[in-house]
Amino acid sequence: MTIPTLTTDRLLLIPLVAEDAVQIQRLYPRWEIVRYMVSSVPWPYPDNGAEYYVNNVALPDMEKGIAWFWSIRRREVPDELMG
């Protein structure tokens, strides 16, 4: 199954790829974000947390067709994740 890129006038929702883990790791480990997540998200967030999640949870589930994950980006800065 091919997961589509979704677009709005301002945003791009691009299917998650392994390379996104670097930016996720830089953005994600902030208490003001993690505190709203499920209790299984570790805190303090580990140095390899994003890489582990992307490569061992998200991408395998996408390949199985049981989950879908997108990165959120502004159209004017498509190489920069915002979520």
Image (spheres, grey):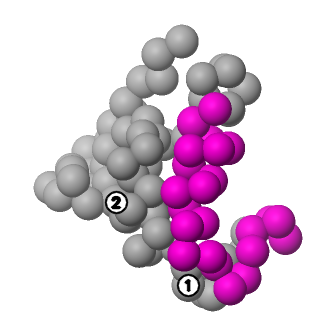
**Would you say residue 81 is visible in this rendering?**
yes
- Quadrant hosting residue 66: top right
* Residue of label 1: 30
Relative to 27, 49 lies left or right? right
Residue visible at 60% across and 55% down? 52
- Quadrant hosting residue 42: bottom right
- Quadrant hosting residue 56: top right
Q: For mark 1, give the secondary structure.
A: loop
Q: Position of residue 12 (x, y in %)?
A: 32, 44
Relative to 5, 38 lies left or right? right
The span shown in magenta is 38-60
In the rendered image, the vertical position of residue 7 relative to residue 80, given as above or below: above
Q: Alpha-carbon distance for marks 2 and 1?
A: 15 Å
Quarter of the rendering occupied by the C terminus: bottom left
Q: Amino acid at mark 1?
A: Arg
Q: For mark 2, give the secondary structure.
A: strand
Residue visible at 32% across and 54% down? 73
Relative to 40, 36 lies left or right? left
Which one is nearer the viewer's eye here, 51 or 82?
51
Q: Position of residue 69 (x, y in %)?
A: 55, 40
* Residue of label 2: 81
In the rendered image, the vertical position of residue 18 relative to residue 43, given as above or below: above
Residue visible at 34% across and 59% down? 81
Which one is nearer the viewer's eye here, 56 or 26?
56
The question of residue 2 being in magenta is answered with: no
**Circle 2 crowding by C-alpha within 10 Å: few under 14, some 14–19, many from 20:** some
**Would you say residue 72 is visible in this rendering?**
no
Relative to 41, 3 lies left or right? left
Q: Position of residue 15 (x, y in %)?
A: 43, 36
Residue visible at 54% across and 12% down? 1
